[in-house]
Amino acid sequence: MTDTPAPAASPAPADDAARPGSVLVVGGGVAGFAAVRELRRRGHAGELTLVEPQGLPYDRPPLSKEFLTGDADAHRLLLAPPPWFAEHRVTLVARRAERLELDDDGAARPRVVLDDGAVLTADAVVLAPGGRPRLLAVPGGDHPDVAVLRTRADAERIAARLHLGARVTVIGGGFTGAEVASAAREVLAEVTLVSASAAPALAAVGPALAARLHVLHAERGVDVLEGLVTRIDHADADAPHRVHVRHPDGSEASVAADLVVAAVGIAPNTALAEAAGLEVDGGILVDETGRTSHPAVFAVGDAVRRRGTEGTSPHAARHWEPALHSGQDVAAAILGEEAPARGTPWFWSDRHGVHVEGAGSMLPVPGGRIVDRAVRGTVVAGFALDADGRMTGAAAVDDPMAVKAARRIIDRGIVVDPARLADPDVPVRALLRG
Ligand SMILES: Cc1cc2nc3c(=O)[nH]c(=O)nc-3n(C[C@H](O)[C@H](O)[C@H](O)COP(=O)(O)OP(=O)(O)OC[C@H]3O[C@@H](n4cnc5c(N)ncnc54)[C@H](O)[C@@H]3O)c2cc1C
């Protein structure tokens, strides 16, 4: 994250009396670390503590990409070099927060109890515990040998078993599953990908691009099975693992594997918040500033779900940039300052040498439509329009500039001409003029 440019102007300081003396952040992923860094950048001079059991904060996107293929080492993952913490007077506590203790009336400061029994208190607490991989709810699915991918240790464990000829079965065709399958092919493993759908990631990239991206797997030598995993046997006579799959037509198949990776979604880490009595519903519930149902406790990143003026958001965008922004914005809120306007959430993903980006949601809205852009019959981008012709989502392959322009079109609420949008000879930025 050291490459993220800081906003040009420093914000005006708020009334000092409104600022908390000390802040404690639980969780040092991109969201928690962004909160810490932004607090100092905005001039928070008080105590600042980051509790992260894995030690130095690191970034996750490379874990399913270059780190898995051995093209990036652990040092390159770090969100800040080790001296940064002392230089910025941030106390990094390499422990796990076990409990959050709160007084109903808010009279006493929140207390965080660590796994060694130590108790830390602060004027404001930020919860940034992220998410954890969902387990596969089938017999054998929760076996410890079924690998998942969330942490550096998970990635190291998978990477150590990716090699020429290794039989690797990846379960789940979403972004993480697709990236793992791609990385495994890169090191010439024999890869099977089991996907419940022939067009996963549909909500993020739309039906045509989702189908095109999925077909890429087979083109790059991945054996793709459509269906649901019904059982995983371990210690089969021919292989360490055997994955049983039921196809949509009811037929069944089984795949022998040396390594099974389950990439079937993320569950937000809400236990700490829930046990403390904070409101939780599919995520730690926060308002638009990141504040939870307790005035001195904030929450950010993949663990949260936002309540808006129109009700709770139907789903949280669990991507890197929204997590980063939520951390930065909560720092502003804690200090009583304005956070910048953020606009439509954005994400990227890479597979088989192809770079995908998207903004907003590609799910069709009532009365709306999806417009695809194709070059010589191959879909290169998709756009979702609402009933009035305003863009609500965009995604493109190997064309970040198109998505950048589309994001501005979405943010400005510009009505676009579908025919020009579909025309690959019209740069998307030209539609910014309406
Ligand atoms: C393999 C992988 C690849 C990804 N690739 C992309 C991509 O290409 N593009 C994209 O847009 N997004 C990508 N993402 C998503 C993005 O990385 C996440 O949205 C982001 O990491 C969320 O940040 P976070 O800080 O909320 O959570 P996390 O990154 O999960 O960090 C949470 C931290 O909290 C700590 N923690 C948990 N419980 C406690 C506790 N009780 N006490 C103290 N600490 C605790 C954990 O140890 C962890 O370090 C990827 C995610 C993964 C896992």
Image: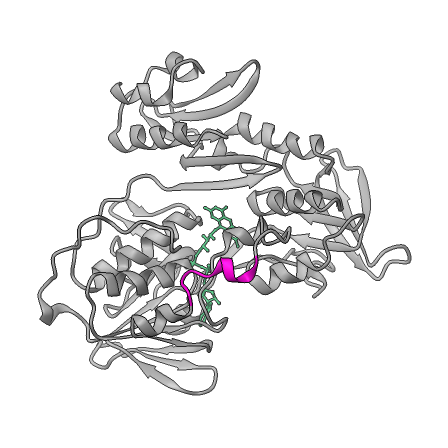
Comparing 104 with 102, the one in front is: 102
Q: Judge left or right: residue 137 versus residue 191.
A: left
Instruction: Give the position of the N terminus as an image quadrant.
Output: bottom left
Residue at the outermost bottom position = 117
Q: How is the image coloured?
A: one colour
Per the rendered image, the range of residues in magenta is 73-81
Task: Indicate the position of residue 31 as horizontal and vertical percent values.
Answer: 38, 59
Observer able to see residue 49: no
> From the viewer's perspective, is residue 26 above or below residue 34?
below
Quadrant of the rendered image containing residue 410: top left
Which is more toward the observer, 205 or 275?
205
In the image, is residue 248 above or below residue 136? Answer: above
Question: Which quadrant of the figure contains the C terminus?
Answer: top left
Q: Is residue 246 visible?
A: yes
Residue 35 image offset from top left, x and y in percent: 31, 62
**Is residue 20 shown in magenta?**
no
Instruction: Assess whether residue 74 is covered by the magenta stretch.
Output: yes
Q: Could you tell me which residue is drawn at 25 percent across and 56 percent down?
A: 289
Q: Viewed as shown, does residue 365 lie left or right of 106?
A: right
Q: Position of residue 423 (x, y in %)?
A: 43, 13
